[in-house]
């Protein structure tokens, strides 16, 4: 069934009207954004709290995962003491001050001769 049937005018299946109308109202969107972020400029407790929460979320997002390659294993230390060994793959770990992941290459051979 065609979406622009004859006699019914141009009907858009996504509900955007007949075309030729206005695009998204960028100025209204920017105004709403400025109002929501007004606490940052105001220096109130809401602005500082929002900044702290945003920094904590960014820290957790960027520092809570480890990717171990196929030829490696990951040795996890929690507060400096051995905790567990990670197989190859994508893993969730606690952020850096709590857990540290050291990748060890398992394919290389090291020998010592006297």
Image (spheres, helix red, strand yellow):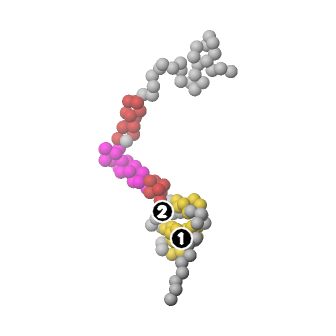
Please give the range of residues in magenta.
39-56
Residue 76 visible within the image:
no
Magenta-colored segment: predominant secondary structure: helix
Disc 1 crowd rating (10 Å Cα; few below 14, some 14-19, many 20+) is some
Q: Earlier in the sequence, mark 2 or mark 1?
A: 2
Secondary structure of residue under mark 2? loop
Residue 63 visible within the image:
yes
Does 48 lie within the magenta span? yes
Residue 7 horizontal side relative to residue 114, left or right = right
> On the image, numbered disc 1 is attached to which residue?
104
Nearest to the observer: residue 84 or residue 90: 90
Quick one: quadrant of the N terminus?
top right
Nearest to the observer: residue 67 or residue 36: 67
Disc 2 crowd rating (10 Å Cα; few below 14, some 14-19, many 20+) is some
Q: Which mark is residue 75?
A: none
Q: Nearer the viewer, mark 2 or mark 1?
A: 1
Relative height, residue 41 to residue 80 (above, below): above
Secondary structure of residue under mark 1? strand
Which percent across, then down, holds residue 19? 51, 20
């Amino acid at each position: 069934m065609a979406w622009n049937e004859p006699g019914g005018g141009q009907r858009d299946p996504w509900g955007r009207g007949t075309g030729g109308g206005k695009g998204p109202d960028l100025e209204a969107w920017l105004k709403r954004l400025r109002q929501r972020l007004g606490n940052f400029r105001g220096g109130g407790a809401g602005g500082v709290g929002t900044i702290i929460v945003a920094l904590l979320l960014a820290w957790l997002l960027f520092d809570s995962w480890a990717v171990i390659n196929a030829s490696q294993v990951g040795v996890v230390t929690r507060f400096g003491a051995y905790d567990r060994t990670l197989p190859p793959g994508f893993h969730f770990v606690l952020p850096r001050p709590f857990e540290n992941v050291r990748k060890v290459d398992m394919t290389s051979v090291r020998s010592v001769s006297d």
